[in-house]
Image (tube, grey):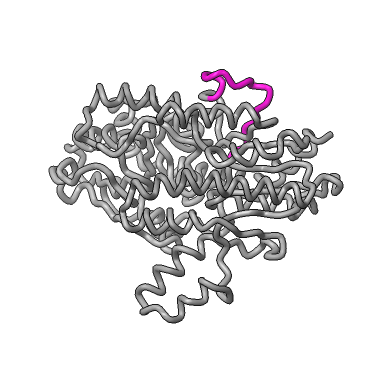
Amino acid sequence: MSRSINTDVRVGVFHPGTQHSHETALAFQEAGSLAWYATSIFYDAGRWPYNAAKFLPPGARVRFEYEFKRRYHQELDPSLVRTFGVWEWVERLSMRAGFRTLEHYANEWGNVRFGRRVADLAARTSVDAIWGSDTSSLTAFSGVKDRGVRCILDQTVGHPRVWNRILTEERCLVGRDFDPYPRPYPEADMQRVERELELADRVVCGSSFVRDTLIETGVKAEKMCVIPYGVPGGTFSPRETPAGHDGLRLLFVGHFGLRKGAWYLLEVMRRLAHLRGLTLTIVGKSTVPDRFLAPFGERVRRIPHVSRNQVHGVYRDADVFVLPSLFEGSSIAVFEALASGLPVVTTPNAGSVVRDGVDGFVVPIRDAEALAEPIERLYHDPQLRGEMAVRARLRALEFPWRRYREELVHRLETWTN
């Protein structure tokens, strides 16, 4: 339980989506300082439209409940939750239907309208601070700044100017055909991000990579702090018995595409084709055309979707987790892999807590040779793999969500004093 802070300090937490905002709100609820948590969707089976699920066909009902039960946290006090903003519903439906243009504009318009409602809510409830996330806080911050309300920004990903540079370089290296989906941020969007950062009194970064990209683009280091995310308690754990098989089973979980270093992971599979029993399982959405995967046959398998209550089994069926990201915030999948007792091979840009040579390996971005070397080493050395697996699990235990919440409370106490 988070320790109580000065209860005269009232905090409003907001997010039009979810990410880890439930944990942020819970931190201040536990500390007795949460004025409200504002979001667009918070699941309540007894309220409209969530209670309409009972009228849906069984298959549609399962999908409906899966989609919206993620927008719920059983420990949050419903009386402190405020919901508004129809545009999040439009964005969700557009995303599921594949209407990307509508999804983009729904997100953009929705964030502005949601921010106005948050600013109005802050004025009515006399909060001392509001706590929002990147790309969705500009309107809210602008609406409260003149009233002396502290603005705290949760920066969940690196600066978009850095992404644009990386994307431009990557297009020159691998071309556009490999993954045509990623787009550079328009200048207007980057200016909004920079104005949001300017208005923020404090910026909380999920990793040192995120912080470093902000410093690179001119944000003052003294207004920032790094607080790593957490692992859901009890959800992820190692398999009980050692794997009884030959070879090495690699696992990738997330959006398989250019930003996550997909080109380099497939290049590793080409370079290590001589290793018998080396396989790669990709779990999640992919924007890499199938023709790039087809030559690998059964050595590379893709599972487009796994429900949250089944994903722990995917980790248990693997030996090593690989995430060669070019640009991240701080991958939750890495925390899940560590908790599942998997050595992790990743890059500095993944923003992880992996320690090179201890519970995994951290290699430079865009270096297939450097990425292949530890994978081949782990293939040939099951003892090392086992030792790293133990240390990976112990590393994950250092980062429960409880620790994250306590650190948020401590930071707010420091800032308000």
Does residue 305 show up magenta in the picture? Answer: no
Residue drawn 17% across the image and 37% down it: 274
- At which x and y percent is residue 370? 33, 25
- At which x and y percent is residue 124? 76, 51
Say if 204 sits above or below 253 in the image: above
Q: How many marks?
A: 0
- At which x and y percent is residue 149? 75, 38
Residue drawn 20% across the image and 32% down it: 271
341 sits to left or right of 33:
left
Q: Quadrant of the N terminus?
A: bottom right
Say if 62 sits above or below 81 in the image: below
Q: Nearest the camera: 336 or 186?
A: 186
Q: Quadrant of the C terminus?
A: top right
- Residue 105 appearing in the image: yes
Does residue 226 show up magenta in the picture? Answer: yes
Q: Which residue occupies the extreme bottom position in the image?
A: 55
Say if 93 sits above or below 133 in the image: below
Residue drawn 65% across the image and 59% down it: 82
322 sits to left or right of 89:
left
Q: Nearest the camera: 276 or 41?
A: 41
- At which x and y percent is residue 44? 58, 70
Residue drawn 14% across the image and 46% down it: 294
For the magenta stretch, what is the residue range? 214-228
- Identify the image quadrant of residue 163: top left
Q: Nearest the camera: 322 or 221?
A: 221
10 sits to left or right of 111:
right
Say if 96 sits above or below 220 in the image: below
- Residue 1 appearing in the image: no
